[in-house]
Image (cartoon, rainbow, N blue to C red):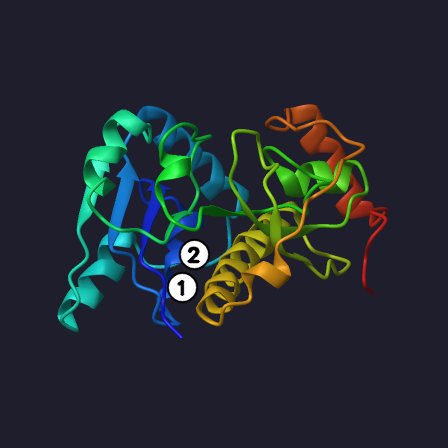
Amino acid sequence: MVKPTFAYLLLKEHPYGREMLRQILSEGFVPSIVITEDSVIGDEEREKFLKRIEGNPIAPTIEAQLAELAESGVSVPHIEVSIHNSEQVMPHIADIPLDLVVFGGTRIIRGEILDHSKDGVINSHPGLLPECRGSASPAWSVYHDIPVGSSTHFCDNGIDTGELLLRREVPVKRGMTYEDLCYETLVLAGVLMKEALIAYEHGKWDEMRRPQGESEHPTFRNAPEEVLEVVGQKLRDQTYAHYVD
């Protein structure tokens, strides 16, 4: 059993990427390089996500987690780029024999990055695939009465359309808020990435990977205020269709 060599990409100090890094480091999966996108859009996405999980704990910063690794004698290069595109990312990974690239919360990435690593690029998505592709998955899940959950999948040139490795529902209990659902899917996404890397280490991906199939829903965009109002009301009234209690 051999742990994969991988690059880890995320938006700067995004809570999603911080949690995922904590999860995978807990099982000894240490990236060969961390590449952070430091951009205005990245800042906006981070602040938007922080609001979505308001009131819930946040994993230590990327800098703190890497500093703790360094104290134990493991130094991981941490590079900042202004955008995760091939022009800016490839010079940093072209000479590294990567098994994988792991996305820890990024914008949509296409091009050469997707083809560089030996065994592909994987991402964890805070929604069940194929039912809930795109943005603000917990909101659209409640709005359309889709089960809430997270999925780990391969990345291709589509939006959340690559082959599946894992997917799992979040047990939604009465009284949970939208912020709670966003937090639970964030944590589950990190857990599923950790489990996917463990499965890779044990050579199980071939038996796990499978096509997603089609979805009856479109690829969702950020949920507008009127949708969030409906979501909040459904959760307060407990009329969402998939409670476990």
Whether residue 180 appears in this view of the structure is no
For the residues marked 1 and 2, what is the alpha-carbon distance in whole angstroms?
A: 6 Å
Residue labelled with disc 2: 20
What is the x, y in percent for residue 164? 62, 50
Would you identify the image quadrant in which residue 159 lies?
top right
Q: Residue at x 74, y 40 (%)?
A: 213
Residue 83 is left or right of residue 103, and the answer is left
Disc 1 marks a residue whose amino acid type is: Ile
Q: Residue at x 39, y 72 (%)?
A: 27
Residue 2 is left or right of residue 75, and the answer is right
Disc 2 marks a residue whose amino acid type is: Met
Look at the numbered discs 1 and 2 and tell me whether their residues touch, using CB distance below 8 Å.
yes
Would you place residue 88 above or below residue 65 in this image? Answer: above
What is the x, y in percent for residue 125? 56, 45
Residue labelled with disc 1: 24
Q: Quadrant of the C terminus?
A: bottom right
What is the x, y in percent for residue 191? 52, 63
